[in-house]
Amino acid sequence: VKLRLATKYTLCISLLLILVVSLVLLGLAALGKHHLDQFRSELTQALTTAKTIDNERVLQANAKYLHRRLFNPMYNLDISSLNEEIKLVRQLLPVTEFLILDRQGTILTDGTKENKRYGEALSIPNLLKQQTTQFLENKNTLKLNLIIGSKDFLLGYALISLNNQALLDSIGILNKDMSRMNDRLLHSLLLAFLGTMILTILLGVLLSRSLSRFLSRPLTEMSKAAERYAQGQLTYPLPVRTEDELGELAYSLNKMAADLHKSEGQIRAIVNNSTTVINIKDRNGRYLLINKRFQELFLIGQTCIKGKTDYDLFSEQTAALLQRNDQTVLASNLPMQFEESFIQNDGQHTYISDKFPLYLADGTAYAICSISTDITQRKNWENQLRKSEENLSTTLNSIGDGVITTDADGVITRINPVAVELTGWATEDAVGQSIHKVVQIIDETSHIAIPLPVERCIEEGIVIGLANHTLLIRRDGKKIAIEDSMAPIRHEKNDISGIVLVFHDVTKARHLAAKLSYQASHDALTGLINRHEFAHRIEAAQRNAKDRNSQHVMLYIDLDQFKIVNDTSGHVAGDELLKQIASLLKESLREGDTLARLGGDEFGVLLENCPLEKAAKIAEQIRLKLMEFHFIWQDLSFNINCSIGIAPINQTSSNLSEVLSAADLACIAAKDGGRNRIHIADTHDQGFIQRKGEMRWLPRLQNAFKNDNFHLYAQKIIACTDKSHPIKHIELLLRLQENDLIIPPGAFIPAAERYNFMPQIDNWVISRVFSYIQQQSTDENIKYAINLSGASISDPTLVKYIFSQSDKFKIAPEKICFEITETAAIANLTNASNLIKILKSEGFSFALDDFGSGLSSFAYLKNLPVDYLKIDGMFVKDIVNDPLDYTMVKSINDIGHSMGIKTIAEYVENAEILDQLTILGVDYAQGFYIHKPEPIRNFDF
Amino acid sequence: MLARICRRWLLLTFYFFLLFLPTLFGTLHAKEKTTQIKFGVINKRQNHPDVVFQQYGKFYAYLTRRLAEQDIDTAPLIITQNVQEMENAVRTNTVNMFMEGLMPSLALKYNTKLVNPSLLAWRKGQRQYYSVFFVRRDSSIATLVDLRSHSIAFEKPGSTSAFQVPLAILRQQNITTSPARFINNDSSVHYQFAGTELNQVYWVLRRKTNAAAFNDGDWNRLPEHIRKDLQIIYQSKPMVRWLVSFHQDLKPSTKAAVVKILLHMHEDPQGIAAMQSKFRISRFENLNKKDQANLDYWQKVLINSEVLQ
């Protein structure tokens, strides 16, 4: 361990002092021991006596305590306890006698077992009678007398004698011995003091020499070295002689000089190699130092510059500016920055100059240093940047979208006028604010705040299109529909420094979209939702029923008399009726129920969360309400009834079409049941099953068209009376072939009618028959009967189609007779009448099929200018046996003839029927007896 | 048939045996004698168990050591606060050996019927002692009868010779006694307790009471110049000084071992040292017939005078 200088000297001096003091003390101790041994026994005795004095003091101090201790035994005449107390005091004090006296002064006990002085009478000092405690002292004895009890309640006295003589003797001897010992000690101390002084002087001389050697020489060397350093000789080495603080100091000075030398070299290198222009001038503007760059730029050497001013180097104007800047810095005494310009070889350059004063040790500025950086290039860039900035601002101010840019923390850095207009935040208010504060958007429907995904955009670095249907809340609280997107702003190094939010007002577009959406889902006439939307809601209800086991109901409402209104008063009246019916239906429904127009005169109602019984009640209310309703159009009044099909929507409902068809079938059942009634769909109901069966025909019929499975059969119609009539009649019948099975029309026609296939089928038949006729021989005496369905009668395109087909196949209208059933004609009376009139005017003929099955057939005959009446086979087949049928056939035949209409009897199954018909004068007969239908390809007249 | 009857009787006998088995076991167990010495002491100075240990410690240590040589175990010394507590200890067999004066020994024998004094001890130099009644020499009281309507100082309630025996003697002579009150105006002897024999003497001398009673040993130890002012007016029959009693349930061999050690203790220097230390016993002896008669006499007196109840 390296000993420090201070430690060295401290140890050295301490050791010396300890040595000296030890010697002194040893001498003193030897002297003291000699004398103390001599007087040890006297001293011990003196101390013992001193202890006795101390006990006396204790006794005096505790006289009251003793007084209290003796009271109780005295009062109880408890001699044993008194003796115990006396014994205790004797152990503590040098008692020579302790007597307890009664009030009369007679001794009660002296504390001994023998109690030899018992009964002896003593005189009580008068003084004690006046006070409780008395101390008496003579040469040999110290007496302590005290009263037991009090002056008023005196029990007795205690007289205590202590040996005083021994005490006094001891003290006297002690005093004498101590004086003698003191004298000797003083003598000894004097000798010790003299010895210590001599030793201390010697020690001082030794220390001085050592200090001189250890301290002075290194200090002198350091002083010389410091002078050299001050003269700039920083390489001068200082010897390091010791490893103490002086050695460390010398080492540090060497290191300091080396560091100084090094740092001076560094500064010189920096100054000379710096691209900045550095110079130092004195207070009067005279150059003291310039760096290499200065020399290069202004073509002047370091040696020449000294003493020169700016006026010697630059133009007067430049020099004046430089001088003024320098004086400003010197006046303010603070570092300052100036922009200064110089003319150089390649033109004018702009510098940014940092100027600061240089100080002396006393704080006085003696010079000024300038460090000038050429910022000409930077100035050019700044100008370019400013221009870019102006361009950017102009662009942003010109575009129609709101644009907001932020930094990486989402703090707005720029906002264009459109964004200002849309957000309601002024530019100065918005810039510096968080974008979340300025751009607050909510969901259009729920009005729940939608957070801007600024952080995600920055983290993931992707362009994010914001949520649809958003509303921007302006600063004034107004809401604007916007569409927006957010993109990260990237630096050259692909770092993301912020985001740009682009958004625009889409209020108008969204209104338009809403309108389109409304129109797509609503019926234009009634304002109710349309079939498409209704289907969606039924599907939603179905899902809900499945998920939550809830019960909903669909009503399928079909107006019974709509066609009549439409036919008799026109479409305008029909439309008005539908509007009024829609209003009526709305009134009958609960809040939240859905009413839709499904098409034509059909309405649908969705009763959500409604038991079937309740739905039935609602349906019944609707029915009654419509019954009470009278539709007035011009002078006409119409009673309106409806048929309502009710179908439950519950967990067992499999899909949308099942619900719709169930409701539709229930409605059909209501109609079949006589109309103006409600019917609840029952999957076990026979009618339902049948109608459902019809539904299954739908794909089969579609398939038949696709695969050309329809075939034509022909059946002859013969003349009964005028058998020589040259015209032959054939009725063409339709059959459906599936695999090897030939299906008669009765099986699929109802389904085809139900699902509106009949016009298509009729067109197919017309086309095929016309084609067939063309391909046949030129026998022009054959008349082909083609059946037209009720649906085709109302089809406005039918006439056009017939004409086009007849033109196409070059068919003579006279060869064609269209058959329409009485029921279909009556149901579409106007259309039927018009159709007959049009086609007849072109040469086609008409037959009224199944005549007689309707209730008021004859009444309609006047409006239907047909050529043939085909008597319903139901009357014909029993004509031989049933007189009523006979009468019916006869009547029809008679009326027909009276109206100039030929008659045809169907279902002629035997010769008797034919004979009977012949007798009655029926013109034509048709039936299995005459000819069984056969495929037209095999047919041959 | 016979076999079945025999089997039934055998079963009944077995069940009967099972029924009484615990009782039988208990009885057998109860009759088992104690082998451990459980020495008890009545502490005359409450809250000062150190006094007891000073008095009996060395003695009991000696006894323990000697008994251990014969593989006889001793329990730790049991200190009771009064006679009643010792009585309970005897009843529960917590103590099966003790040493006491005449009155406590007889009281414990009479009340528990479980202990019997077996040895006597010489104490303070006395094999037997007397109770003496004394008055001031100048007193007019000359007999016990003269004490009527006067006061007497006894030592303390637990003292045999300085309270219980004198009380019994007074009652034997049809002299009624009562504790002293502030005003005493009846014909009974009014007694109060002075605490120590020394106080008894000075109370008489200083006329605090008219008389006092304690044992003849105390009388003889009075300084002559004190005694000269007093005179004895009555002396009782002698009493055995100190007795050693044993529990009936102590195993005879154990008791015999203890008795043997005690009887020869005065022949052993260590035994002498143990007896003399504070205890002030000089030797033990067997009770002879005269001693037994003396005990019977005093038991009778104490019972008749209702001191012993």
Image (cartoon, coloured by chain):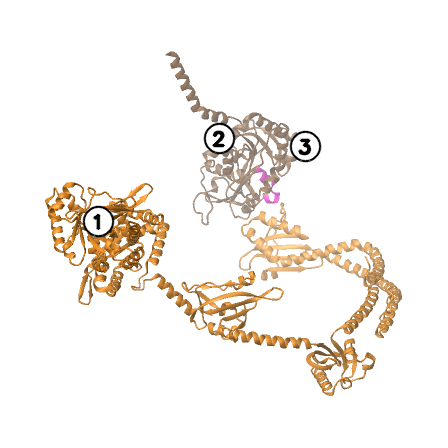
Chain colours: A orange, B brown
Q: Is residue A104 visible?
A: no
Give me the C-alpha separation between circle 2 and circle 1.
Answer: 161 Å
Q: Which residue is mark 3?
A: B269
Quadrant assignment, res B101:
top right
Q: Is residue A673 above or below residue A293?
A: above
Q: Is residue A858 above or below residue A418?
A: above
Q: Secondary structure at mark 1?
A: strand
Q: Which residue is mark 2?
A: B113
Q: Chain of mark 3?
A: B
Q: Is residue A50 visible?
A: yes
Q: Residues within 10 Å of mark 2 (few under 14, many from 20)?
A: few
Q: Are marks 2 and 3 in contact (CB under 8 Å)?
A: no
Disc 2 vs disc 1: which is toward the camera?
1
**Residue A721, percent across and down?**
14, 47
- Magenta residue check for A101: no
Q: Secondary structure at mark 3?
A: helix
Q: Nearer the viewer, residue A532 or B282?
A: A532
In the rendered image, residues at marks 1 and 3 fall on the same chain: no
Q: Which residues are magenta?
A: B216-226
User: What secondary structure predominates along the stretch shown in magenta?
Assistant: helix
Q: Chain of mark 1?
A: A
Left or right of residue A883, residue A466 in this image: right
Give me the C-alpha separation between circle 2 and circle 3.
Answer: 36 Å
Which residue is depicted at the point 18% across and 58% down? A865
Left or right of residue A730, residue A29 in this image: right
Q: Is residue A711 above or below residue A23?
A: above
